[in-house]
Image (cartoon, coloured by chain):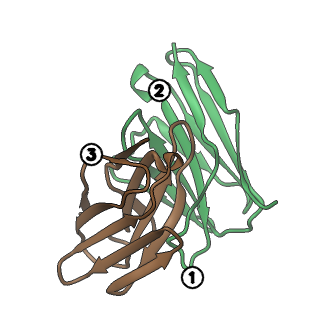
Amino acid sequence: DAMVIQNPRYQVTQFGKPVTLSCSQTLNHNVMYWYQQKSSQAPKLLFHYYDKDFNNEADTPDNFQSRRPNTSFCFLDIRSPGLGDAAMYLCATSRRGQGGEKLFFGSGTQLSVL
Amino acid sequence: GQSLEQPSEVTAVEGAIVQINCTYQTSGFYGLSWYQQHDGGAPTFLSYNALDGLEETGRFSSFLSRSDSYGYLLLQELQMKDSASYFCAVRDQAGTALIFGKGTTLSVSS
């Protein structure tokens, strides 16, 4: 089945140690998103790609970066994780121009920072 | 910027009907979406309204009034499995990405 896959499901890192979260999709969607969600809060948009065009939200910390080497893969890099970066990180995709309100989410990566 | 307001919690019993309201303020409006998220799970798409009126999908319906900047999600014949968080969402100013409301936690009891 076509889907959005995030690895790993759980990630533990140390304070200040760089970490990379990965996302892949088999839906061939042209838009990919990274959201951060803390407990009992709404998903907060960090960035998104429309094809190769990168869009960074104004309040996304510089500590967060993203790469999309091809249509299928997208990575979230946290250069120096702090305790406040512990959260669920959700990757999502959509197809612009085809009822693009429908986002398909991966299962998320729960990041813990020790 | 975009902002959405929805109640933080709603409780109901099995078989009941519940309505979750959402008001929004946007610079540019492309439609109102609703997502469901079970505890520990990922959000899943429920519905989308671009035009005024009611959209029905099984037990769930969604309504939009663009003149009032208001919409709601209506859940009928509630089941225990409907206990989840429900988010309304609109596109950002550029119209390229979805911004979510703070979510409404629905608790269904027997």
Which quadrant is the N terminus of chain B positioned in? bottom left
Q: Give the image location of residue B67, x and y in percent.
A: 19, 84
The residue sitting at 55% across, 28% down in the picture is A111
Tell me the element at label 2.
Answer: loop
> Total label count?
3
Q: Which residue is mark 3?
A: B8
Q: Which chain is brown?
A: B
Q: Where is residue B6, by image quadrant? A: bottom left
Q: Give the image location of residue A89, x and y in percent.
A: 54, 40
User: Between residues A1 and B92, which one lies in front from this camera angle?
Assistant: A1
Q: Amino acid at mark 2?
A: Ala
Q: Which mark is residue A97?
A: 1
Specify the subunit that label 3 lies on: B
Q: Is residue B81 visible?
A: yes
Q: A12 left or right of B26?
A: right
Q: Which residue is mark 2?
A: A86
Q: Residue furthest right?
A: A1
